[in-house]
Amino acid sequence: MSGVDLTNIVKKYGSFQVVHGIDLMVAEKEFVVLVGPSGCGKSTTLRMIAGLEEITDGDLTIDGRRMNRIAPKDRDVAMVFQNYALYPHLNVADNMAFGLRIRKMPKAEIKTTIDDVAAILGLTDYLDRRPADLSGGQRQRVAMGRAIVRHPKVFLFDEPLSNLDAKLRTQMRAEIKRLHKRLGVTSIYVTHDQVEAMTLADRIVVMNDGRIEQIGTPMELFNNPVNTFVAGFLGSPPMNQVKGTLTHTGVKVGNTEIKIDGASATQVGRQVVVGLRPEHVTLSVKENTSAIPIVLDLVEPLGSEALLHGRFEGNEVVFKAETNGDIGHLSGVTEIHVASSLVKLFDGETGQALNLGS
């Protein structure tokens, strides 16, 4: 079993603590993405798994073996970095083979391994080229190939797509996903890009200020964020959050009352944060929906859909709407509608998610 288990992991630099006792179990063959804002501790956590940072406290096991004091070269993990870290004077084949030669693998076996991995990554025609002669996407594939040829128990990715343009990032996301499906190696991936996290992960770990806020599948976190931080971090655009007060039938935001499921007299007057996903609204009245007035500032066309930027009871909000091939009809929008079952509530003080029906 090549799983990774972090138990109460702590990292300190002197008296400054950057990782605060996190617990995480990554199953064999699972693809887990650590996501969060800059400085949240995700890369530090990955580097502790790789052995590039010393663990201050807690236990790290890989394949059931405690790794706290094991050298990086003996952990059987392979890491793909943001900056590629290729040798400029070596061609693609030699870059990929470098680690194998250090391990004194037989030449014939090295050639077979390089040829096999190059075929998987579409690099067969580039084996004689040097990094300077490759595109950014090709260089990243070489860096991935150098990791794959080692047949490690665990792949570690530290923001590997950050240096690529938008089109290449999309292509490389798909390639990494296909590669994981084909190889089935346990993988831990760090990014600050929530789109990468949503598209790649079997499970997402949302981190903030050195702590884990929530762990779950992409759709679990998207549909049921545990607090306002997760709600505001995942989603593009993120969930709209406005302050409101619970009533007998719903929640009141300014002069607007929004129907919610589970409203009761015992909660009347409670201060809450109302969460409205941009995707969870319509322009037409439907059953069990509430009308939300919007003062439209801007229509931002994206093709099949558009973003409606405006203000709702003094709060800046963004909603999505279908264009149907034209945005002319969207300039006159004065209200949108949201179903009661899709309104999310969070405690006004703690920011923790509320379930009034429980």
Image: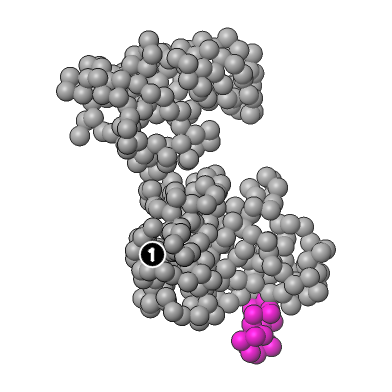
Give 282 or 68, whichever is nearer the viewer.
68
Disc 1 is placed on an element classified as: strand
Q: Is residue 130 left or right of residue 214?
A: right
* Residue 22 rendering spot, x and y as whole percentages: 37, 59
- Provide the residue span drawn in magenta: 97-114
Q: Quadrant of the N terminus?
A: bottom left
Q: Residues within 10 Å of mark 1 (few under 14, many from 20)?
A: many
* Residue 346 rendering spot, x and y as whole percentages: 33, 32
* Residue 149 rendering spot, x and y as whole percentages: 61, 75
Q: Is residue 165 left or right of residue 193?
A: right
Q: Which residue is pictured at 68% across the width and 74% down the height?
A: 96
Give 350 or 251, whichever is nearer the viewer.
350
Amino acid at pointer 1 = Ile
**Which residue, given by chain and number where applicable, does mark 1 sit on?**
9
Residue furthest left as drawn: 266
Instruction: Judge whether 350 appears above or below 285 on screen.
Output: below
Q: Is residue 123 magenta?
A: no
> What main secondary structure does the magenta stretch of the protein show?
helix
Q: Which residue is pictured at 48% across the width and 20% down the height?
A: 315
Q: Quadrant of the C terminus?
A: top left
